[in-house]
Amino acid sequence: MANGTIEQQLQDHGIHPTAARILVLQKLSELTHPVSMTELETELETMDKSTIFRTLNVLLEHHAIHSFEDGSGSVKYEICRCESTVCRVENRHIHFYCEGCNRTFCIDDVKIPVVELPDGYEIESINYTVKGLCPECSGRKA
Amino acid sequence: MANGTIEQQLQDHGIHPTAARILVLQKLSELTHPVSMTELETELETMDKSTIFRTLNVLLEHHAIHSFEDGSGSVKYEICRCESTVCRVENRHIHFYCEGCNRTFCIDDVKIPVVELPDGYEIESINYTVKGLCPECSGRKA
DNA sequence: GTCACTTTGCAATCCGGTTGCAGTGACGGA
DNA sequence: TCCGTCACTGCAACCGGATTGCAAAGTGAC
């Protein structure tokens, strides 16, 4: 899914490409860090909050993007860069939330360690988010 | 910290024991699953929401309890059952949020796998939450 | 008892998320 | 081409969890 036009990506995921969906996915593909709905709202000033909200939900349902909660209180979204249309849990990377600057980082190099759960539990997704200080903030503090 | 009276536990963490703090910590120590502020509010009907809120913050600051976000949208709280007053990241267990019944489970047996981060990142805490179906709900579905 | 400080309850507020509804646009069939 | 249908979008209102301001009540030191 990493190549092709945004429009193509949408279709690959079975999503009817509309102006709003292209814009949102476009923006998410440009960004290198996860963003909240509010951030998207300011990035895409022409688009209404509810449209962004519903667009994100469509993208989520079709697994074109991921969402997760860092400790900031608002849900963060990022584009799914999996090669296939299905993204396996073990391929997902972890995130880091800096309590100093309130930014959320993708640690692309580090994949989520998948644990063995007791019988009966069915894993759908895993959120692995580390809180602490990013290199910039820990350096400044020291 | 697993033994002694609630009052003693508070003092061990350097918290001045008040009625509200004892009640909240008492309740959290009785419960076997993490709860939201709203749930605490109904459990402790005599106590005001804002008091609970501030009490939880005091307990958090002094590491008497932990908080984390499952996927439910509200923050969950649980008592810290560490033996010492400092609770190490690697001692913490993972959580499971069931999308079927919207309950949050402690998987006490499974500790959070701690990853190696790139240079400069300082780990303060880790949230490892699995989403999916609990044994009850996955069984019912099948 | 008095003063200073902490704790608590009430009410109001904030804000991210969500929904109802009406207007607009795309598409297929007559 | 016109019409009906359905998906999509924007606006405004709403909801609920989280947070704050303020005044009253409680607590401890003297």
Image (cartoon, coloured by chain):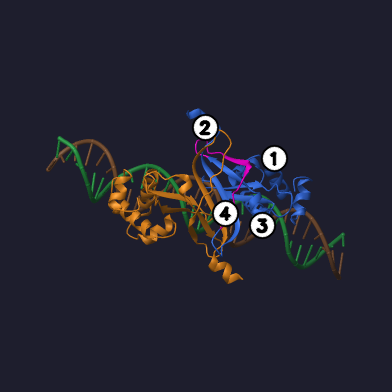
Chain colours: A blue, B orange, C brown, D green
Residue A115, numbered circle: 4
Chain on which label 3 sits: A
> Which label lies toward us, 4 or 3?
4
Q: Is residue B26 left or right of residue B109?
A: left
What SS does tag 3 mark? helix
Q: Which quadrant holds residue D8? A: bottom right
How many angstroms separate mark 1 from mark 2 (CA)?
Answer: 25 Å
Q: Is residue B78 left or right of residue B94?
A: left
How many angstroms separate mark 2 from mark 4 (CA)?
Answer: 31 Å
> Which label lies toward us, 2 or 3?
2
What SS does tag 4 mark? loop
Query: In the figure, A52 relative to A108: above or below?
Result: below
Q: Which residues are magenta?
A: A98-116
Please name the residue shown 39% across and 58% down the image. Answer: B41
Q: Is residue A24 magenta?
A: no
Chain on which label 2 sits: A
Q: Is residue D27 left or right of residue B118?
A: left
Q: Callout 2, which amino acid?
A: Cys
Query: In the figure, A130 relative to A101: above or below?
Result: below
Q: Are marks 2 and 3 in contact (CB under 8 Å)?
A: no
User: Which tag, 1 or 2, sits closer to the chain's start?
Assistant: 1
For label 1, the residue is A30
How many angstroms separate mark 1 from mark 4 (CA)?
Answer: 32 Å
How many angstroms separate mark 4 from mark 3 (CA)?
Answer: 25 Å
Q: Residues within 10 Å of mark 4 (few under 14, many from 20)?
A: some
For label 3, the residue is A61
Q: Callout 3, which amino acid?
A: Glu
Residue A137, numbered circle: 2
